[in-house]
Amino acid sequence: MDLRTESAVDPHRSLHSETGGLPGEHRGRSRNPLTKIVGLAWLEFEKPDLGRAERFLSDFGFTVADRTPEALVLRGNWAGTPGLIVRRGTTSRFVGPAFAADARADLDRLARAMDVSVRPHRGGYTVALTDPSGFPVRVVHDVPELPAVPERGPLPLNVGLEPARVNGTQRPVRHPAQIQRLGHVAIGTTRFQAALDWYLDTLGMIVSDFLYFDGQRDRGPTMAFIRCDLGSVPSDHHTLAMALQTQTGYLHSAYQVTDLDEVAVAGEYLHERGYRHAWGIGRHIQGSQIFDYWRDQDRLMFEHYTDGDVFDCSMRPGWAPMSVSGLAQWGPKATAEFTGARDPGVLVAAIKALREKGNEIDVAALRGLIKVMGS
Ligand SMILES: [Fe+2]
């Protein structure tokens, strides 16, 4: 199908991208997925010092839902499963995501197809899978949810002809963010194509936007913003963002807060406490979120965001060339702190990936990545 014929009312146009997919390009969805997950349940991390981890995560805006000597469970204010599980481990690292299935039958189908078992987990059930990048991926069902916690509503803004505040002032309180919920996780992988197809075929996710190396579109996409397929129910523009990189690993995870003031004031709070700012405040192009990125004490990156796009299943993927400047509509220039361009070991990782067999890193890919960093 030529997706360009569908672009007459395509909001991917303009800033977002000029065309959809071309004939023969990746469709961005599986014709017959094994199951369709309905959301991101939580992310699992390991930290050597749980007290230290709790300090950052509380300052970032999470509430502790449970704490044992071996694990920390953190939540946002909205009802649902806690968004973060941090276990004691030898190093600071992202372990993997847990996605939510709508029915026990989905777990049974996954278990049969992947030759694993459905097991009890955190009061519900899980299947434990491994994606082609090597990340452990859980799919869970029936895990008890926490009730909502009261939070402040969006600040009333004096916009338009009817002011919302007459004889009133605007005084957002400087405090840790009120995190509402986990939004998405972004990962880098040396096996992008294989991992992309796995998430679409196995978990039934669909692509909102593809990015490709400028001048190498025929290579196929090298980054994808992937959402859950909830049919006519809108879902976050991306629940998973995945990019071809010289090293497989966690890039960042993102958490929704109430509004722009919350993003800004929560950032001031983190700044006062001496945390390292990575990039922001700005507004993304793919997903449109107003974003602000921070690093924890071990340099893992966490994002506050608000006002992200939601798409239903009718939206086809947008296509655009990948560039650092193309990550935002407005805001400061993306920093090396955000892109990781100056991370020690970048060059070593590139050489290692080039030598290693079975991944998708070749000389052209390196050339593409270098061009992205400088663009
Ligand atoms: Fe993000």
Image (cartoon, rainbow, N blue to C red):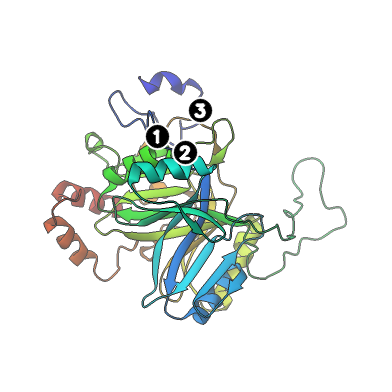
Residue 258 picture quarter: bottom right
Residue 222 picture quarter: top left
205 with respect to 153 (left or right): left
Task: Specify the amino acid type for callout 3.
Answer: Ser
Real-space Cα distance between discs 2 and 1?
A: 7 Å
**Residue ID for mark 3:** 314
Q: Are marks 3 and 2 in contact (CB under 8 Å)?
A: no
Give me the residue at 46% from left, 37% from top.
15
Mark 2 is surrounded, within 10 Å at the Cα level, by few (under 14), some (14 to 19) or many (20 or more) other residues, namely many
Mark 3 is surrounded, within 10 Å at the Cα level, by few (under 14), some (14 to 19) or many (20 or more) other residues, namely few
> Residue 10: percent from the left, percent from the top?
48, 27
> Residue 344: percent from the left, percent from the top?
26, 71
Residue 321 seen anywhere in this rendered image of the structure: no
306 is higher (above) or lower (below) than 92: above
- Looking at the rendered structure, the secondary structure element under dot 3 is loop
Q: Are marks 3 and 1 in contact (CB under 8 Å)?
A: no
Give me the residue at 46% from left, 81% from top.
49
- Pick whichever, 223 or 199, lies toward us: 199
Residue 33, label in figure: 1
Give me the residue at 44% from left, 67% from top.
45
Viewer-side label of 3, 2: 2
Residue 311 seen anywhere in this rendered image of the structure: yes
Task: Specify the amino acid type for callout 2.
Answer: Lys
Judge: label 3 CB < 8 Å from ligand 1: no
**Residue ID for mark 2:** 36
- Looking at the rendered structure, the secondary structure element under dot 2 is loop
> Residue 193: percent from the left, percent from the top?
27, 43
Q: Are marks 2 and 1 in contact (CB under 8 Å)?
A: yes
Real-space Cα distance between discs 3 and 1?
A: 17 Å
> Residue 114: percent from the left, percent from the top?
34, 45
- Pick whichever, 116 or 30, lies toward us: 116
